[in-house]
Amino acid sequence: MSQEHKFKNLLCIVTVNCNLRCRMCFNWKNNETDEIEAGRLKEAISDLYKGGFLTTDASVVFAGGEALLRNDIFELIKFSRGLGLVTTLATSGYLYNDRIREQLRDSDSYVALPLDSLKRNTHDYLRGKDGVFDNAMRIIQDFPRKVSLTCTISAYNITEICEIAEWVEANDNVAGLGFQAIVSPFNAPNRNNFYHSPEFGHLWPKDVSAVCASLDKLIEIRNRSKKIYTTQKHLSFFKEYFSDPASINGEAGCRVGDASLTITNKADVIFCSYVGKFGNIREAAITDILSAENVQSMKNKMLKCKRESCEFYVNCFFED
């Protein structure tokens, strides 16, 4: 397999069900019973690793929905760790308890948590349930330097993002922090122009000058920090996005498939859910699905995508 088709990131969406009520996501409305079998997923991960489809520093992320809703999530993590792969459990932390703490410690996995505010009430409001903030703080305390955080910038925390960055910088237990911009809520019935809608407009920061001022200060903090993952160019791009979201359409073409591969809860193999699948591991081996011809064809299709305010282009796979 050619180097250009090796993947640095493998995202395994083990479920789309979720027990929270996040304001920026409607996954909690799912009641999906079709979830990929652990055996099939382990086989696919093993084939990718042994077949040379992953880079030597590849990371496997197990996410949802809420990944901890899967009773076999630690079986999947430990299997991947047994291959020598770096693993990350993406979770809200809401289900965290003593049993999960011991399972997580035994798995030797990293953890990715959301942190949208240092104010308990604000974070819990945005995540839709009381107690999410407190459990996140417990995980940070219990797993020093194993936890990375993601802050979603919205109207509710735009004046607080610098404080969050400085808190992370001073907190030895936190490995790092990334920022994302609020985008159209996942699985919402009408996602177009969400920033003007009565239902979701409250999430959108209206004062563009205040947004830019906060982001400028955040860039200054980022340039002297060793723990903020989001690049200066990406943070500057957020200023453009919040100033005129309708103008952001991936005009250069999306390159998510250059480094990242996703296996969904339905066993589909995708680069992007909007462009579509190019195989299913219930129907064919992942090594056959990832033929050079199939991969290149999907990459070419994605390069032509001009989806407005796409969350993948804005946040997840912004290209510096």
Image (cartoon, grey):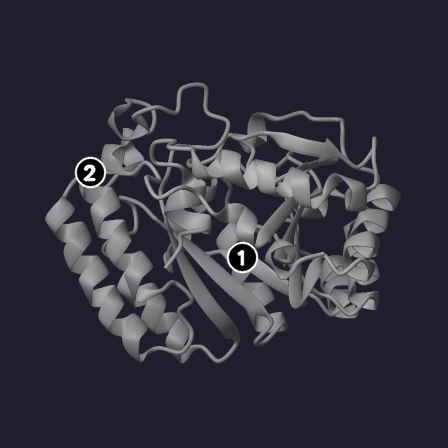
Which quarter of the image is occupied by the N terminus?
Answer: bottom right
Please, what is the three-letter code of the amino acid marked with disc 1? Leu
The image quarter in which residue 222 lies = bottom left
Q: Residues within 10 Å of mark 2 (few under 14, many from 20)?
A: few
Instruction: State the residue at coordinates (30%, 51%).
Output: 157
Instruction: State the residue at coordinates (20%, 59%).
Output: 214
Please, what is the three-letter code of the amino acid marked with disc 2? Asp
Residue 244 numbered tag = 2
The image quarter in which residue 29 lies = top right
Tell me the SS state at disc 1.
strand
> Most extreme residue toward the right, as rendered?
39
In this picture, residue 90 sits left or right of residue 52: left
**Marks 2 and 1, how far apart in space?**
29 Å
Which quarter of the image is occupied by the C terminus?
Answer: bottom left
Discs 2/1, front: 2
Residue 36, horizontal then vertical, whole percent = 78, 36
In this picture, residue 308 sits left or right of residue 105: left
Would residue 125 be visible to someone looking at this image? no
Q: Which residue carries the number 1 mark?
A: 113
Label pair 2/1, CB-CB below 8 angstroms: no
Give the total number of marks visible in the rendering.
Answer: 2
Residue 128, horizontal then vertical, whole percent = 48, 38
2 or 122: nearer the viewer: 2
In this picture, residue 318 sits left or right of residue 197: right
Residue 152, horizontal then vertical, whole percent = 39, 50
